[in-house]
Amino acid sequence: MNKMQSTQGGTCDNPGKKQAGTIIVKFENEPEVSTKDSEYELVLEVIGNKTSNNNVGVDIVMVLEVSYCMGGDKLKVMKRAVQFVIKQLSPSDRLSIITFSTNVEKKWDFQYMTVQARNEADKLVHDLRAYGCANISDGLRNALNVLENRKDASGRYGVVMLMSNGVHNVGGDATQISIDRFPVFTFGFGTNTQVLEVIARKSKEGKFYMVNPGNLTDVMSKCLDWLFRASIQDATLVINPTIGTVTKDEKIMTEIKKVYAGKYQVSTDNKSVEFGNLKGNERHLVLVHLFLPKVPKEVHIDSLQIFCKYRNEKNVETRTNPVIFRVKRRNSPKETHTHAKLVEMAKHELVHTKQQVVVVKHGPYGSRCPENYSMTLEDNESIKEVILSYGFIMDGIGFIIEKPGMNPIKKVFGGTGGDNSKIELKCGEVITQISGTSGEYSYCSNERLISSLKIHTNYRPEGYGPYGIKRCTRNVLEFASPKNLDGRIIGFCGNARRYLFSLGIYVKKDC
């Protein structure tokens, strides 16, 4: 792009101090447009910006069991899990793939995950077949060797993702391997999980996950969130028309006719786009269709003010420094083939991304403690009741989940003390938003937790509640998940112990 304008960072008391998460918005500024009534398509590039503490990609070695024990449905689920991870990687991340059955095979040496590389890796995983026994030991040893001997490793975070049925019947005891240098994340696809749990526990910061078709997206998202440590949360692009001065007595305002953002939620007034959480170097395109009223003479006009707002790693709402999109109004504007090609490429990419299914997480709101609970609805499941336990603050939350032909399932997160209430959802009624407050609770060592909560639905947009009276709390902060979601809430996540410390939502976008 010529004459590229960009905005990044956020306002802070010390402008010279880098923040843990920032957003860059790039666009071509000061294009030439006719003085007549005109339309213009502005391409915005929104990028999650890594800082000095997180400025390089991640090196992931995937170790995949392809023995007969992983045949059938287990292999299908594992393939979906691997393909999900591949789609989330950015061009700064590197991936290596090792498969093991009786023998070990390096299927994919370290490569930067460009679009072409992601497509090739996806096809490789699709074509995997099951055969032989399970040699977990040699698979793990090979993965650790790949990490030890990788090139250009300075400053890069290396990790092993081991996916297995959990039974090692050849190659020795995998739990005896020295694995304290790198994190090993293990994913179990069977009932024998002890070996995988021990491997994860012995490694540096490793974790074990149990995977099934119902929680696949949830589990892999949780692991990736930890890996990439996204510090840019609830990112929203804001586009505001400005009043441009033509003469001393004449002013005009640019009209935003339509905003195209692929799979992401655009507000009804076409002035904002919600991206959810962004990790470093994650990139999105937005196409803004503008109408520029005619002007009586050639002039430079301020047309739009553009900025982003988000919550940083301290849960504080931050916004980038606003920038102005300016237009040169000309009687005979120069046509640029570069801009036309850029618009065409943006349209192609946006159509492609809109066809993808995506689950976006908002929150969790409240405590910054690591998440320890998560639930997502399977296909044909629905929430029949919401159970709330509360008093001075929120003790816990629960759900009665229904599925045709099955007995209802009850899931509760947090404590059950205090008062208890139920929200019985009517036929066709669904949860559309959560809102409330969080505060530091004096009876819990001043830890931040959810001090009050409202549950909003399509039948009751003002919300049920509030539950919890915020007593004995200080430094109270309000929160609310986004309204007008382009999709439906399919799950909840957060931290819950004796009390409800945090709460967030999963939204499945309608793509």
Image (cartoon, rainbow, N blue to C red):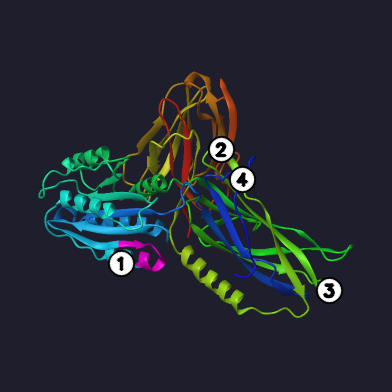
Assess whether residue 253 is covered by the magenta stretch: no
| Residue on which the image places disc 3 | 297
Mark 2 and mark 4 in contact? Answer it, CB < 8 Å: no
Q: Which mark is residue 435?
A: 2
What is the x, y in percent for residue 177?
18, 43
Specify the amino acid type for callout 1: Lys
| Distance between the alpha carbons at the discs numbered 2 and 3 | 50 Å
| Residue on which the image places disc 4 | 16
Specify the amino acid type for callout 2: Ser
| Distance between the alpha carbons at the discs numbered 1 and 2 | 42 Å
Q: Secondary structure at mark 2?
A: strand
Q: Residue at x 27, y 51 (%)?
A: 148
Q: Is residue 63 left or right of residue 318?
A: left
Specify the amino acid type for callout 3: Lys
Front: mark 3 or 4: 4
What is the x, y in percent for residue 308?
61, 52
Q: Is residue 255 left or right of residue 279?
A: right
Front: mark 1 or 2: 1
| Residue on which the image places disc 1 | 123
Quarter of the image that includes the N terminus:
bottom right
What is the x, y in percent for residue 385?
44, 37
Front: mark 4 or 1: 4
User: Considering depth in this image, is 9 or 129 the residue closer to the camera?
Assistant: 9
Q: Secondary structure at mark 3?
A: loop
Q: Residues within 10 Å of mark 2 (few under 14, many from 20)?
A: many
Q: Is residue 83 visible?
A: no
Q: Is residue 145 placed above or below 178 in the rendered structure?
A: below
Provide the residue span drawn in magenta.
Answer: 110-119
| Distance between the alpha carbons at the discs numbered 2 and 4 | 34 Å
Looking at the image, the residue that sits furthest to the right is 249
